[in-house]
Amino acid sequence: MIEQNLNWKQLNRVVLSVNSVDISYSDSSSLTLQCGFENIAKGRCNLRIQEKINKESDSLLVETDQALMLVKIFYSRKKIDNLIDIFSKKRATSKKAEVNLEISDKLMINENGYLYVKDKMDIKIDAVSWKIPLI
């Protein structure tokens, strides 16, 4: 008989490690970040920062059919320009930038850090914080 591990814990914060940053320019600029996870064992995350036009909400989409999360963050033009400025001044360092997402619904992970996903989830992000090493 195979014993299953039922030691699940709730996660109310997703911590992302930034692997790359792309800037898109058109009528307005946006940032696309490719990220890995610091507190979830497997998967990747595409984080898109766009200009807030109306009352869009920051969100985290968890897919069931792939190990990918999609994050949409909406900032003012000034805040996006500040991030672009900071990332453009960032020197090559082994330390990666980190993004902390405080989420409204809790995710479930087991003791090995594997995420439990039964159904596709669209989760509201309550707060976003950044840690960007410059040197």
Image (cartoon, rainbow, N blue to C red):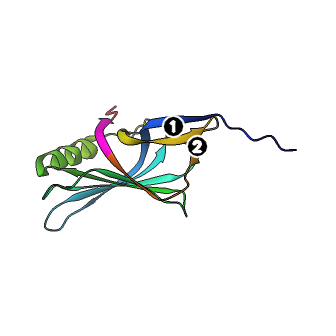
- Residue 99 position, x and y percent, is 36, 40
Residue plotted at (23% across, 58% down):
30
Circle on res. 39: 1
Say whether residue 133 is visible: yes
Residue at the outermost bottom position: 26
Circle on res. 96: none
- Residue 105 position, x and y percent, is 40, 43
Residue 27 found in image quarter: bottom left
Circle on res. 41: 2
Please state, as top left, top right, bottom left or bottom right, where the C terminus lies in the image: top left
Residue plotted at (16% across, 45% down):
79
- Per the picture, the main secondary structure of the magenta-coloured stretch is strand
Residue plotted at (47% across, 59% down):
120
Q: How many marks?
A: 2
- Residue 25 position, x and y percent, is 20, 64
Residue at the outermost right position: 1
Residue toward you, 54 or 93? 54
> Hey, what amino acid is under mark 1?
Asn
Q: Which residues are magenta?
A: 125-130
